[in-house]
Image (spheres, rainbow, N blue to C red):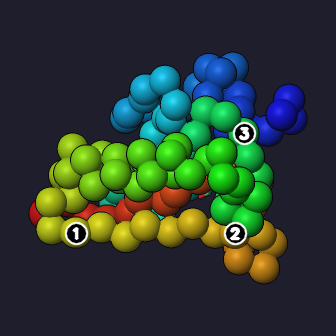
Amino acid sequence: MTDCIFCKIAAKDIPSDTVYEDGEMLCFKDIRPAAPVHLLLIPKAHFDSLAHAKAEHEALLGKMMLKVPQIAEAAGLTNGFKTVINTGKGGGQEVFHLHIHIMGTPS
Ligand code: AMP
Ligand code: ZN
């Protein structure tokens, strides 16, 4: 989606402070952190939100979920962390490219 800021980050058209990347996903620091560590994990392929996920996204979403604790540990969140997926305007979503917030305080 051409006008999507997270697609532009995934394409490296907009810089981000990347902490993890593979062929399917990218994790970078939130520009307005709400916690000492605040990361966003996105799929490189665009879909708007969890409410727009389809059966074809099942494996990707599973891989992302399994990657979250690895990224959290690498960021120093060894005592636990919070994950948030805001979905839709009523769910507080501002950027309509699916993303998982990973937040916490390094122990
Ligand atoms: P949400 O409300 O779940 O859609 O969260 C969107 C998040 O994206 C917010 O926490 C923003 O601070 C963050 N954000 C917006 N633009 C950027 C950017 N260019 N780089 C990093 N984080 C961003
Ligand atoms: Zn996008």
2 or 1: tag closer to the N-terminus? 1
Residue at left offset 46%, top offset 40%:
27
Q: CA distance from mark 3 to mark 2?
A: 15 Å
3 or 2: tag closer to the N-terminus? 3
User: What's the residue type where badge 1 is placed?
Assistant: Gly
The disc at residue 46 is 3
The residue most toward the front is 55
* Quadrant including the N terminus: top right
Residue 95 appears anywhere in the view: no
Pair 1/3: label in front: 3
Whether disc 3's CB lies below 8 Å from ligand 2 is answered yes
Task: Tell me the residue that label 1 is attached to.
Answer: 80
* Quadrant including the C terminus: bottom left
Task: Tell me the residue that label 2 is attached to.
Answer: 87
Q: Is the residue marked by circle 1 packed among few (<14), some (14-19), or many (20+) residues within 10 Å?
A: some
Q: Which SS class for mark 3?
A: loop
Measured from the top left, where is residue 80 in percent x and y?
22, 69
User: What's the residue type where badge 2 is placed?
Assistant: Thr
Up-down relation of residue 31 to residue 45 (above or below):
below
Measured from the top left, where is residue 55 in percent x and y?
66, 53
1 or 3: tag closer to the N-terminus? 3
Residue at left offset 76%, top offset 58%:
52
Measured from the top left, where is residue 95 in percent x and y?
73, 54
Q: CA distance from mark 1 to mark 3?
A: 29 Å
